[in-house]
Amino acid sequence: MKELLEHQLASLLDDIKPGRVKEAMQYSLLAPGKRIRPLLLLTVLKAYGVDFHPYLNQAAAIEMIHTYSLIHDDLPCMDNDDLRRGRATCHKKFDEATAVLAGDALLNYAFEILLKCEIEASINVDLAFILASKSGQNGMIYGQQQDIYFENKNPSLEELQDIHLHKTANLLQVPLMMGARIADTASISIWEEVGKYLGFAFQIQDDILDVVGNSTKLGKEIGSDDKLNKATYVSIIGLEKSRKYVDQYYRKAIELLYGLKMNHGVMLEMFEDLMKRER
Ligand code: GRG
């Protein structure tokens, strides 16, 4: 599944006009990311017994939006990071203008690809709507805004959770909701809920790894939250309680999965990998 996706990501960029922006798009998109979001879509389809092969472009579109967000998040005007996915960040490898444009280009190209897919038009529109709304100013971008706003401040756990919902969970909800729209439309809101808890767990795990993780395995510098004076679950309630929250949120997501008519084992396998993640 992952190899097919990697191949699709690379070949989709063949059609881009040559130049530094294309090189930067290739550099960041084809870097060794975990591909969690696109694999979640393909895994949901598999769990419902739907052939995932016709949906590789939808999966690739989600990864493009995710990669654009990482490129912009690393810029000096945001988190100012030097390392991402084990490599120099896009603006370090190229320059800031090229990195901004590569992010913008991936954002637009994601929708080009999605809208060109030859599937039923009403499903296509719904998939594009899910991706646009969850990654826009009512979703991921709002989360980024709040994340920046709360630097050097002391947010409450509720405020922190609101950041996590938008910055992280919203884009993890996308593949689950897209998969549901394709395979089991009536369950979209349950999958949205699954994505919310998955996102909460995933972000707290990320904050834990930023303190106790291994920079080589993670492919990025650790201690970045501390450097930017960002409050996290770990800084507010400590490591042990944060680990309990991770466990609790994964459990809530998994409980919801059992209420759905599909092959639970396929989905659980992926969730178990995520629970054990070290990067
Ligand atoms: C629109 C100007 C503009 C910026 C958008 C929203 C945003 C910038 C950035 C958010 C990026 C971010 C750090 C989100 C938190 C979620 C998270 C833990 C991302 C890392 O995801 P992984 O671990 O990364 O799946 P890989 O590299 O494996 O894909």
Image (tube, helix red, strand yellow):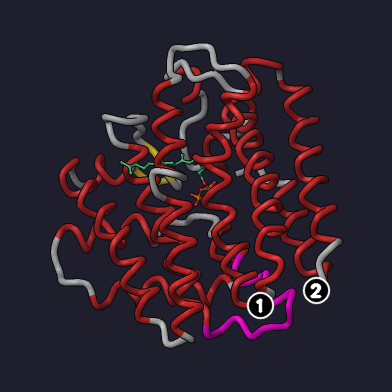
Find residue 194 and report its horizontal and vertical position in percent. Answer: 71, 53
Near-viewer residue (21 or 214): 21
Q: What is the quadrant of the N terminus in the image?
A: bottom right
Measured from the top left, where is residue 136 in percent x and y?
39, 49
Residue 143 percent across, percent down from the top left: 46, 36
Please give the name of the residue rendered at 48% of the width and 79% of the height, measured from the top-left corner.
Answer: 122
Q: Which residue is mark 2?
A: 262
Q: Is mark 1 within 8 Å of ligand 1?
A: no
Assign the magenta stretch its main secondary structure.
helix
Instruction: Give the magenta range.
Output: 41-54
Disc 1: which residue: 183
Asked if residue 111 is positioned above or below residue 247 in the image, the reply reads: below
Q: Amino acid at mark 2?
A: Met
Indicate whether residue 232 is drawn in magenta. Answer: no
Q: Is residue 253 above or below residue 156?
A: below
Residue sitting at 51 percent across and 78 percent down? 123
**SS of the residue under disc 2:** loop
* Label 2 or label 1, whichever comes before in sequence order: 1
Q: Is residue 142 left or right of residue 190?
A: left
Instruction: Give, as a three-letter code, the residue at label 1.
Output: Ala
Q: Is residue 26 left or right of residue 226?
A: left
Q: Given contact means CB atoms under 8 Å apart, are the residues at marks 2 and 1 in contact?
A: yes
